[in-house]
Image: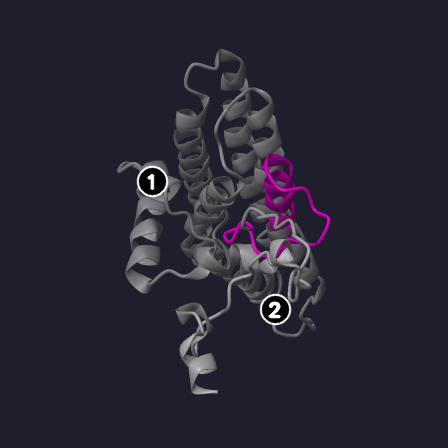
Amino acid sequence: MEEGYTSLPTSHSVGSVPAVVAEESQGRATIGVFPKTNLQIFPPGNIASGYQAPGTPYGEDAQSANSWNGYFSISSYQPYFNVDTDIVFDRLVGAVYPMDGFCTKVDANPDLYGPVWISTTLVFLLSALGNCATYLMKNGNNPEIAWNFDVNYVNWAASVIYGYVLAVPASFYFLLRYFGSNAGLVQLWCIWGYSLSIFIPTALLLVIPLEILKWIIILFAGSASAYFIGLNLKPYTEGQHDLFLWVIGASVLQFVLAIFIKMFFFA
C-alpha cells in the first residue's frame, strides 16, 4: 500500500486537479474524459446606457435606440437638476443682464432646475397678480361692486407658460437639427426657461394701476427677453444664413408672449 501511494504522480496530490491522460495505448479504459466545449465571449453591455434587454443588438443600433428612449425617461433628466444655488443665481443674473455670454455658461452644463421653478413661479404670479391688477383697475375705485377671484387665470397661465417653454424650444430643436446645427434640446429648454425670469419682477410692477406705465414696463421686458433669445440662438446658427430669419422669428415670438401677458392678465 505504501508503495502504491508513493508512486502517485504529483498532479494527483491533495488540492490539485488531475490531468486527463490518454491511457488507451496501455489498454485501459479512459475515465473522466469530457467532450470539448466551445466558450463564446460576449462583449460587455454598455453600462452608461443602462440595462440592455436580451435579444437587443449590440453596437450603434442599440446605443441609438437607448439614446432616443432616454428622452422619455425621467431618470435621464436627473443630472440636470443637480445644481446649487450659486449656479442658478449666476444664471438668473446672466438672463436679466445678457451681456456675459449666457449660452457659453449653459452649453456644457445645462440645467432644468432653474427653468422649472421660474416657469412655476411665473404661473402663480400671473394668476394671483393678474386678479389683483383687475381688482385695482376695475373695482378699486368703487368698493360697492362685488369682485370675485377668477380661477381660470391659473389654467390659462399654466397652459400658456408650460406649453410655451416646452413646445417652442422643442420645435426649434428639430428645426436647427434639420439645418445641421449642433443645438441640444436640454440647452434650448434651459435658454428659454431662463428667458422668462425677467417676467417675474415685471409681473410685480404690472400691478401698478397706471396704464401707460404698465405698457412701458412690458415693452421694455419683452424687448429684453426677445434680445436674450436672439443673442443665445446666434451661436447655434453661425454659418447658416437660412436660419437668420428663424432667429428673428424666435425673438418676435418672445415679444408676442410679453404682449399676451399684458393684454390677458393685466388689461
Q: Amino acid at mark 2?
A: Asn
Other-residue count near label 1 (Cα within 10 Å), few / some / many at <14 / 14–19 / ≥20: many
The answer to whether residue 142 is left or right of residue 186 is right
Per the image, the residue denoted by label 2 is: 142
Q: Residue at x 49, y 69 (%)?
A: 17
Q: Spot the residue most to the bottom.
A: 1
User: Please, is residue 205 above or below residue 94 in the view?
Assistant: below
Q: Residue 255, percent across and down?
A: 52, 35
User: Please, is residue 184 above or below residue 151 in the view?
Assistant: above
What segment is highlighted magenta in the picture? 45-73
Q: Give residue 138's quadrant in the image.
A: bottom right
Q: Residue at x 43, y 52 (%)?
A: 111
- For the question of whether residue 105 can be seen, the reply is yes
Q: Amino acid at mark 1?
A: Phe
Q: Residue at x 45, y 55 (%)?
A: 80
Q: Residue at x 38, y 39 (%)?
A: 107
**Most common SS among magenta residues:** loop
Display colour scheme: one colour
Other-residue count near label 2 (Cα within 10 Å), few / some / many at <14 / 14–19 / ≥20: few
Secondary structure found at label 2: loop
Asked if the magenta segment contains residue 65, the reply would be yes
Asked if the magenta segment contains residue 216, the reply would be no
Per the image, the residue denoted by label 1 is: 102
Q: Which mark is residue 139?
A: none
User: Please, is residue 187 above or below residue 129 in the view?
Assistant: above
Earlier in the chain: of badge 1 and badge 2, it is 1
